[in-house]
Structures are given as C-alpha cells and as structure tokens.
Amino acid sequence: MRLADMADWRTAPGRLLRWTPTPAAREAASNAPVDPGPPSDLQADHLGAFKERGRNRAWTGVATDVDGDLDREAMTRALRRLVRAHGGFRTFFDLSGPDPVRHLVPAEAVDFQVEEVPAPSGEWDAALQEHLTARFDEECTPDSWPGFAFGVVERPGGFGLFWGCDHAFTDGASQILLGSEIADLYAAELAEPGGPEVVAGALPKPEERGDFREHVEEERKAATRFSPESPEIREWVRMVSDNGNRLPRFPLPLGLAEGEKAPVRIRTLTYLEGDELAAFDRACKAAGARISGGVFAAVAATERMLAGRDRYFGMTVLSTRDRGPHSRSQGWFCTFAPVEFEVGDAGFGELANRAQDALRQAKELSRAPIHLVVDTLLRSGTCTPADLGSPQLLSYLDLRWFPGAGRPADERGVHFTGTGRTSNASMWINRDADRLYLLAQVPDTEQAHESVDTYHRHLREVFQDAAGQEASTGATLLLDGP
C-alpha cells in the first residue's frame, strides 16, 4: 500500500459501477434509532467544523486493482459483510441541534444494490479523478448514511476498486486495513456465499475488531482520571510554554500571512531504497533506537541545519488501537502528542537515541485527553486559539506490519486523502518492504514549494549520510549547516 495523491492511482478504463443502499436500507436509515453516548473528541471537533463550514473535503480513501472478471453479486455480498461488521460504517450524526446526536443503522437492515453510471468524458485518467472527487465530495459526509462511497471500474480480466469515507468514521490505518479486507471478503464470497476467508488470517477475528463506539466510551471514562494538574497535562503545558507558546510550525517560510491557509498540494519523495534502507535500519539499531527514532533524529538534524534549531519540538500522530481489542477495527483511533529533545551538535547516533526516548515520553503524554490539553492551554493563557490552529505534524508508519502487506490488493493499493486547505507542511514518512518515503501536504504557494524542496532535499541527504555511515551511538554527523 502506498500513501500518495489520489491521482497516483491509475487503473485501466472500464465500466463505472456504483454501490448504493437499497430502498429498504435507506428507509431503515431514515428511522435509525439514537445510539447513546457522545462522539469521540476528534469526532466532535470534526463535526463542529463540518457544521460551521459545510463540506470541507475531509474524506479519505483507498483504491486498488483485483485480478479476474468481476462477480457483481459476490462484491455486493462482500460490501454488505464489511458494513455489517463495523459499527462505525453504520453510523451517522444528526447535527441539527446544539450537540451531535449519533444514530446507528441496524446491521440486519444493511444491504446494497449496484448500478452502472455514465462513463466520464475526456481523457480517462483525468476524468476518473473528477468522478472520484465528485462522488466523495457528495457522499462522504458525517450527517447522513452512508458516510462512504464505493465503486468499481469493471473490465474483462480484472477491475479497479475504490472507496472513500468521511474522516469521522475512519483514519489512515483503517483505510489501509480496509483495502485488503474488502478484497479478502470478495475472495471469500467468490469462493462460497457467506464463506470463510480464503487465506488464513486474511479477515479480522471478532476479538480484533472491537466496535469504535466502545472505544469512545472507554476514552471518556479514561478522561475522568485526568485534570489540569495531572503530570501529563503539566508537561504538555511546559513544552508549549518553552517553545514560544505555540504548537509546532514548519521551520521555513511558506508564503502565507499569519493565520492564512492555501489549497493543499500533495508532494511525495523517496528517501531511501533497498540496501540504503537496510543500512539506515542498522544505524538506528546500533544507536539503541528504532527507525521511528531515526526518522525524528533526521528531521531534527535538518531543522538544525536550515533553521538553527538547537532543540527539536514537534507534534506526532499516535495510534490508540492498543487501548482495547481494536487492532483491525474501523474507526478514528488516533491522538496527538508533543516530541521534544535536545539537538545541539550531537551526531546521528546520539540524536536517534534521544529521539527514541522522546517518542516513549510522547506515548505516555498521549494518554492525556486531547480536549483537556487544549482547554488547559487556553485557560492557562499559554496559547490563544490562533496559536493552536493547524500544527505541523510528523507521522511515521511502518506499513510492513499491516495484515495484508505483500498480498496483491495491498501491493497495488493507494491510500489518499482529500485536499482541503492548510497553513503548514505536515509530513507522513512511511516504510514499506523496499522504501522509506514521504507524503507531504503542502500549501500551494510558490514560496512553500521552494521551502519544501529545500527542506526535503536536505532531509534526504541526512538519511543517506546516516545510512552510508551505518552510524553507531557515537558516530559523527555534522549538523552545522550547508
């Protein structure tokens, strides 16, 4: 699975098919009962933004290619099994009142029908992208069911498969899992209606796909154990206070005024491949770190070179799937945590070791409920609302650990996000079997493109230098700038 721009998914031309709920399923959705309990903290923020601004292209999705002629009935059954199995995909929110009200479509009422839609006109690749964007913009919303869109490009001997979903009901890891799960459900249905998995371990077991609503309930219970005086919250406040009373920002100018946003442009870049990646892995291990620590060390070294930052302060995205039986669940299992460590003139090995320690601390700090963190930062006067907007994010993801890794649907798959607006240049650095690579969401301004090119060119050199040296804990990597 590649994390990339949606336009990087290229599938051969064919008939466009669309799956939608049957009339009976839509009727059941219109009468779906209220499901008690509030949304998660991240869902609540997302729903508030949707209610305030309307459609904001906050969807994410996955697309892949499958061999063999499409069996439409088998795919319909596969989609039905998928949605019935994951409560989040049967959820929508009534936003007409002061607070979101969650509704849940009964599993037994879920069913779908397939229809062929008119072929898009014009050059195929561009026309397909327009079709996908239009469908996802229209259908992937949190205030009606379904909050997702599914379809196929059908042709003899194989087909392209695509799915988009509103962010309220999914996250990046969920989408990566979904690409394989829908293909594996289809393979099971193709072999036998309602049948078991074809490849051992391909489909999630019940104990691996706990319902997201249960995760929300546990999140709310856990939050009651924290207060503004909790050590985790105090450390959050200390870090932000010591770093200019602002959340992290991209270190180079992006051509934007304070508070201004610009349309997102997706940028990708390969840092390391093959033997270089293996050497970098060895360098991290020699330093007593993992590749995650090595990634943050390289970023810190780059910011020291380009911006003179002697202390790294960043924000990372962390999974919360370890807080229950959710290793293969569908939902929004994420939180954020600050990462801080000294840089100075340390070599790569020492930096990687410091970064790994900082990531361990970040994991502990991530236990603090993010809404309480934000509230404390504001009430204490540490930050203003403007200081908290659109922080710079750095995520590291090892794609080799996903259950479908190495199998065709995953190998051919692309995970993408909608392109809204941003004031930062956040980075998703990912490892698969052969590459360490970047996906960045960059403001589409001339200065941002120049700054980002400079930044990531130097970051690639840091990665390559570390790999070339196979750094040990005491190895030297000069950070005094170009």
Image (tube, rainbow, N blue to C red):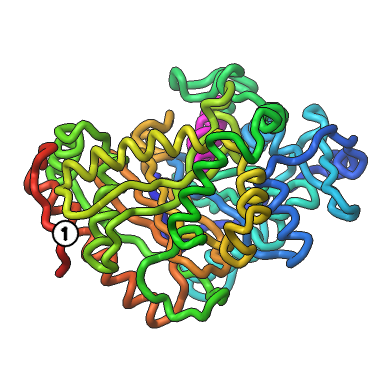
Tell me the kind of residue under disc 1.
Leu
Instruction: Examine the rendering and report whether any part of residue 317 can be seen.
Output: yes
Residue 163 against residue 382 in the figure, above or below: above
Q: Is residue 405 left or right of residue 282?
A: right
User: Could you tell whether 429 is left or right of 129 in the image?
Assistant: left
406 sits to left or right of 444? left
Q: Residue at x 46, y 49 (%)?
A: 239
Report the span colored magenta: 173-188
**In the rendered view of the protein, which quadrant contains the C terminus?**
bottom left
Towards the viewer: 323 or 297: 297
Tell me if mark 1 has few (under 14), some (14-19) or many (20+) residues whose alpha carbon lies within 10 angstroms of its own.
many
The quarter of the picture where residue 103 lies is top right
Q: Nearer the viewer, residue 343 or 412?
A: 343
Local SS, label 1: loop
179 and 350: which one is in front?
Answer: 350
Residue hosting label 1: 479
Query: Residue 404 placed where, x, y %?
Result: 42, 32
* Most common SS among magenta residues: helix
Task: Tell me if residue 104 comes above or below residue 61 in the rendering.
Answer: above
**Percent x, y for residue 123?**
48, 73
Of residues 293 and 129, the one drawn nearer to the viewer in this rendering: 293
Q: Position of residue 55 (x, y in %)?
A: 71, 64
Image coordinates of residue 297 in percent, x first then y, are 26, 48
Image quadrant for the N terminus?
top left
Q: Is residue 119 visible?
A: no
The structure residue drawn at horizontal position 74% and vertical position 43%, both measured from the top left corner, is 113
Quarter location, residue 34 = top right
